[in-house]
Amino acid sequence: MNDDPTAGLGDGKYLSLTTFRKTGTPVATPVWVMREADRLYVITGAESGKIKRLRNNTAVLIAACDVRGQISGPEFHGKATLLDAGDTRWVESLLLHKYGWQARAMNMSQAVQGFGKRLLRKPPGPGRQGISITVLAGDAA
């Protein structure tokens, strides 16, 4: 029997990832999640608000949730680490394997958006950024 209350966090499709503004205001967003060993991994846009907030404060709150971000379990404190390009590609491959056609559809949508920006002579966005999350020991938040 597994006594780790965080063990199921990567089993579901979505994770509520709460990051914090400089003022301390929490911002929660649902993200696709992948668990590998004792870490959780997510992907987001490299210029997203999450990335900007994590550059200032690596503390996060995480919880299982649905697609709308409705939390369905206890919240846990964690520490986020931004991944380099190689590790981001590795996480993208894990998520592609886990989410299959849904991940392919999202990748296609982003490619079409990038093509549209090139047609309009706007520079395409910088791509995607991987995030590794370590759940901190202790009780739920």
Image: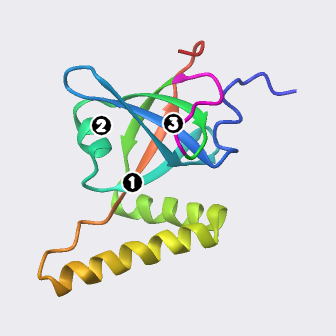
Position of residue 78 measured from the top left corner of the image (x, y, whole percent): 47, 27
Which residue is pictured at 22% across the width and 32% down the height?
56
Checking the image for residue 137, the label placed there is none
**41 to 139, vertically: above or below:** below
Disc 3 crowd rating (10 Å Cα; few below 14, some 14-19, many 20+) is many
| Residue 17: percent from left, percent from top | 46, 36
**Compared to 86, does 18 lie above or below?**
above
As for residue 64 lying within the magenta part, the answer is no
Q: Nearer the viewer, mark 2 or mark 3?
A: 3
- Secondary structure beneath label 1: strand
Q: Residue furthest bottom?
A: 119
Decide if residue 6 is on the left or right side of residue 81.
right
Circle 1 residue: 44
Query: What's the distance in space between the residues labelled 1 and 2, CA to CA?
Result: 12 Å
CB within 8 Å, label 2 to label 3: no
Colour mode?
rainbow
